[in-house]
Amino acid sequence: MNIFRIVQPRTNKRKQENSPYRDIPAVLLFVFLLPYVVSCLWGHVGEETAVLAEKKEEETAWIDRNYEVVLAGNWGKKRMTMQEYLIRRLEMIMPMENDSGIDYEPEALKAQAVLLRTELWALFSEAGEPVVLQENAMLYYGDEMEADEEESPYREAVLETDGIFLSYEGKPVKAAFFPISNGQTRSAKEALGSEEYPYLVSVDCGRDITAWDYQSQVVMSGEEYSALAAELFNASGTVPELRRPPELLYDSAGYVTEVVLDGQRCSGESFRETFGLNSASFRIEWEENEVIFHVKGKGHGFGMSQFGANIKAGDGEAFDKILTDYFFQAELVKIE
């Protein structure tokens, strides 16, 4: 019986502890204090967000205020901030309405914006401020650009990468880019015989061949070819002597590095510019009185392929990954 009396009070206490009414004061206190707790927590986060946003605006304003670009044309000059210049130039280089019918992805635009800033920052580093550029097209036609719109994708790309440039060993890289490769980019060491750009290496761009304007042809008469060849090589021979295939020397990426005719030489880039070819990745077909150039890709082939970058962006790659894909061992740095 004594044992029963000892156990019974303990059993009753346990029942009281499990009572649903025991926690009511704690619940009421929590409900009463909840708005205050939420206000403190989220209010603090909101303040931090506002501070970060304000800091970003200050950084943008600082860059705007300290780095100015002067566009000089045949009939005048125009001053603009670094951001304004980059936004306008980005639209000129990667317009949404273009011959290739490409809609550029936001991350591809960001990658290009960083390269343009890198190019410009290299000029600021060398020449100081302001940088004066000969830019007739932007000077006279820039006011009609979409870039001036507040929600422009070009403005977003520039501001979201604000102050970022691509660096190698502490210096801005040679920010090379071009529209479409012939299937891979070129090694500067091999093609130019220079150790100055170790980050410009050959990169596979196999999906560039899907661009609708990946291949092109230029057809001209024997007379036209001879006249241009005579001008390019400063040949003193008669026109008939120039109507024969030159020797073409290629790099491992398939671009012509040198053209040899009658013992005289010129670079592949000079040759393709003289004959109006899309790139230096070409071969020549000779007919009876006709010369046909078969060309792959567009541009010089060094650095970033814009078409390839857009493909990568469409696959979900961010702009920083795109850039480090094309520029070996380069890193993103912010202007300070």
Image (cartoon, grey):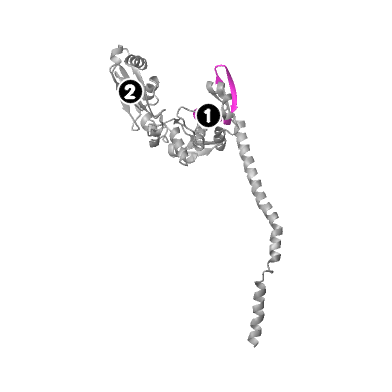
- Measured as percent of width and height from the top left, residue 288 is found at 28, 17
Q: Quick one: 245 or 288, which is closer to the camera? A: 288
Residue type (three-letter) at the residue carrying disc 1:
Glu
Residue 265 figure quarter: top left
Residue type (three-letter) at the residue carrying disc 2:
Val
Looking at the rendering, the stretch of residues picked out in magenta corresponds to: 72-96
Placement of 217 over or under 306, stated as above or below: above
Placement of 218 over or under 237, stated as above or below: below
**Residue at (64%, 82%) from the top-left corner?**
7
Residue labelled with disc 2? 259
Residue labelled with disc 1? 91
Placement of 46 over or under 190, stated as above or below: below
**Residue at (50%, 28%) from the top-left corner?**
97
Is residue 84 found inside the magenta-colored segment of the image?
yes
> How many angstroms separate mark 1 from mark 2 (CA)?
35 Å
Of the two numbered discs 1 and 2 on the same chain, state the one appearing first in sequence: 1
Quadrant where the N terminus is found in the figure: bottom right
Q: How many marks?
A: 2
